[in-house]
Image (spheres, rainbow, N blue to C red):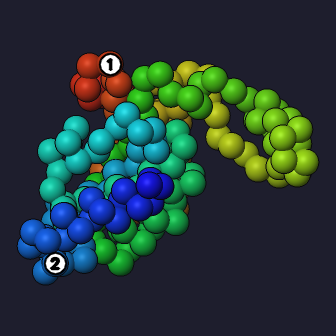
Amino acid sequence: MSVAQEFLKANETYASTFKKGDLPIPPARHVAIVTCMDARIHPARALGLEEGDAHVIRNAGGRTSEALRSLIISEQLLGTTEIVVIHHSDCGMLTFSNDDLRNKVKQELHANADNIDFLPFSNLEQSVRDDVAFLRSSPLIPENITVSGFIYDVKTGKLLPVD
């Protein structure tokens, strides 16, 4: 059985008792979360979220520049008033450079990725500060939107504030 087939089977069980089809489109807690796609992070469990509470935007590294389009939609059209940026310990984005990945793509796929910034970083806390600063200084995110940054520790499950 493929993973997609496993998902369909699991979804049958989930849908059979699903009772939250009437939730409103805007998130109840008026928050958008930008975090990494790392499979070790379960934002709902780690943050005490239920369906309908928050927009959770995930990408490699939890980079805000890549999430900007979604954040604008979240704030402008769906009423979010707060953004939480969460990067995490032991992140794969700390393990390569743009040149490393561009060369791998050339070798493995025989394709050119020279125009792609994969947004790696070498300092975890600084990456959070940079992403928070990016949003706070963006003319596309209003000044009244609260933006905060954290590091999620994948070993302990704890959320650590970054100033």
Q: Residue at x 38, y 74 (%)?
A: 76
Q: Which residue is mark 1?
A: 155
Q: Between residues 75 and 53, which one lies in front from this camera angle?
A: 53
Q: Between residues 136 and 10, which one lies in front from this camera angle?
A: 10
Please say if the residues under marks 1 and 2 sit with CB atoms less than 8 Å apart: no
Q: Residue at x 51, y 49 (%)?
A: 59
| Crowd tier of the residue under label 1, counting other residues whose Cα lies within 10 Å: few below 14, some 14–19, many 20 or above | few
Q: Is residue 163 visible?
A: no
Q: Between residues 43 and 135, which one lies in front from this camera angle?
A: 43
In what element is the residue under mark 1?
Answer: loop
Along the horizontal axis of the image, is 114 left or right of 19?
right
Along the horizontal axis of the image, is 144 left or right of 128?
left
Q: Residue at x 25, y 77 (%)?
A: 25
Image quarter hosting the C terminus: top left
Tally the numbered discs. 2
Horizontal and vertical percent position of residue 104 = 82, 36
Classify 28 as above or below 60: below
The furthest residue to the top? 155
In what element is the residue under mark 2?
Answer: loop
Amino acid at circle 2: Gly
Amino acid at circle 1: Lys
The label on residue 21 is: 2
Q: Which of the 4 quarters of the picture holds residue 160?
A: top left
Horizontal and vertical percent position of residue 1 = 44, 55
Spatial CA distance of label 1 from label 2 is 35 Å
Of the two numbered discs 1 and 2 on the same chain, state the one appearing first in sequence: 2
Classify 74 as above or below 58: below
Q: Residue at x 36, y 59 (%)?
A: 7
The label on residue 17 is: none
